[in-house]
Image (cartoon, grey):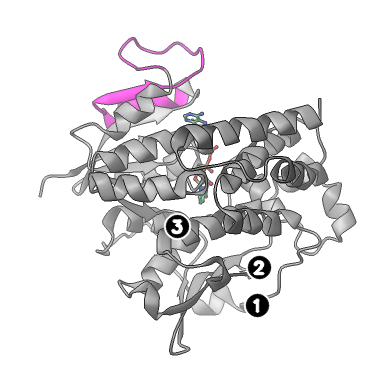
Amino acid sequence: MTPQGVAILGSTGSIGTTALRVLDRHRDRFAVRALTAHANAALLHRQVEAWTPTFVALVEGDGEAPAAWLRGAGALVEAATRPDVAVVLNAIVGAAGLDATLAALGAGKRVALANKESLVVGGALVAAAARRGGGAVVPVDSEHSAILQCLSGRDASEVRKLVITTSGGPFREWPAERVRAATVQDALNHPTWSMGRKITVDSATLANKALEVIEAHFLFGLGYDQIEVVVHPQSIIHSMVEFRDGSVLAQLGVPSMELPILYALSHPERIADAGIPVFDAVSAGRLTFEAVRHEAFPCLGLGIAAGKAGGAAPAVFNGANEQAVALFLEGRVTFGAIAEAVEDALARLAGLSGGDLPSLWHADAQARRTVREKFA
Ligand code: NAD
Ligand code: MG
C-alpha cells in the first residue's frame, strides 16, 4: 500500500506535535507531505529534518527561515490543496483555520479537524464545501471522536440526544466570585488535559464546551435541544450517545489526544497502535457526574444561545472570545471580563447576517473590535 499523504497545519502546536508522534508509528500508512507553523521556526526546522515534507510554510515570525519555505496565510490554503496530500490535519487555533478547512474540502480532501473554530464560524459553509468538493470532515476533538465512534454509522434519526462530557476545568468547585478573579496561572492549570494556551483558557471558562456543542450540531446534524453537557471530572468517558430506544453508548479511555488523532486518520477503520495509553478500569476507579454550574461559567450558556440564534452569532461569539482570551493572557483584563466581553459583543452585534464568507469575516472583525474598544 502506498502511504497516504498528510498535511499538518499547525505542526508546532500541542495537537500538531502529538500528531507527529502518532504518525511516527505509522510511517507505512501515512507520509507527511506538508508542514505549516505560525511562528516557531526552530521547532519547524527540526520537524522538517525529521520528516522531509515536500511543502513547508511559516506563516509569520522573523526567525531565519530557508528560502524554500512559504510565508503568509495563503500558504495554508496551498498546503491544504496539494495534489500529494489526501488528509489535512487542521491543528491551527482559532478562526484563522477556516479558509484552509474550506479549501481542503473543496479539493476533495479528508479533513481531520482539530480546529473546531472552523465549524463554529462557518459550519454551513464547511458542510457546503464538503458536498461540492467531495471532501469529508472527521473530528479530532475527543468528544466528537467519541460520538462518531458510538454512532458507528447509525443515522441521526435513531439518536435521541448527545451527551458531551467536560472535566469542569480547574474552577469546577470554585465559588463564582472566586472564578471571576482567577489569574492566568490558575486558568492555565488544567486538571486532566495538557493543551495550547487558548483552548486551556476556554476549558476554564467552559467557552470550549460551547464551541463543542456548536461543533456537534454541525458535525452530526442534531438540534441544540438534543445536545446536553455534563460534568465528568475524571475525563474517562469522552462523550455518550442516547439512541431512540433509550440505550446509551459511551466511549472510554485514558485522557490522551493520540487515539482521537489516529482515529481521525484511519476512520472508519481501526488500526493497531502500541503507543496509545492502555485503559485499565480498576485504576480508572470511580467515574462521577455533576450538573454544570452555569452561574459560575456564563460562557457556556452564551455560546449555546449564539448557536441557537444562528446567522453570524456563532462567529461573533468566537471572535469576541478569541479577542477577550488574548487580552486575558496578556494580563490586561480579568478572567471574569471574558464572559462580560462576549455577552456585550453578542448583544451589540445581534442580527448580523452570516450567509457567506465575507459577512462572517465582517462579523468576526466587528466582534474583535467591540471587545478591544470595551477595554481600551
Ligand atoms: P496550540 O496553540 O498548541 O497550537 C496552535 C498551532 O496553530 C501552532 O502550531 C501555531 O503555529 C498555529 N497557528 C496559530 N495561529 C495561527 C495563525 N494565525 N495562522 C496559522 N497558524 C497558526 O493549540 P492546540 O492546543 O494544538 O489547539 C489547536 C486546535 O485544536 C484548536 O482549535 C483547539 O481547540 C483544538 N483542540 C486541541 C486539543 C488539545 O488537546 N490541544 C484538543 C481538542 C481540540
Ligand atoms: Mg474537546
Single out the mark in the foreground, 1 or 3.
Answer: 3
**Distance between the Cα atoms at labels 2 and 3?**
26 Å
> Which residue sits at x=81%, y=25%?
376
Do the residues under discs 1 and 2 have CB atoms within 8 angstroms?
yes
Label for residue 182? none
**To which residue does mark 2 refer?**
233
Front residue of 121/116: it is 121
Amino acid type, mark 1: Thr
Extent of the magenta region: 42-71
**To which residue does mark 1 refer?**
288
Label 3 CA crowd tier, 10 Å (few <14, some 14–19, many 20+): some
| First in residue order: circle 1 vs circle 3 | 3
> Which residue sits at x=42%, y=64%?
221
Along the horizontal axis of the image, is 288 left or right of 175? left
Query: Is the C-beta of the residue carrying label 2 under 8 Å from the nearest atom of ligand 2?
Result: no
Query: Is residue 203 a member of the stretch shown in magenta?
Result: no
Label 1 CA crowd tier, 10 Å (few <14, some 14–19, many 20+): few
* Dot 1: element: loop
Label for residue 218? 3
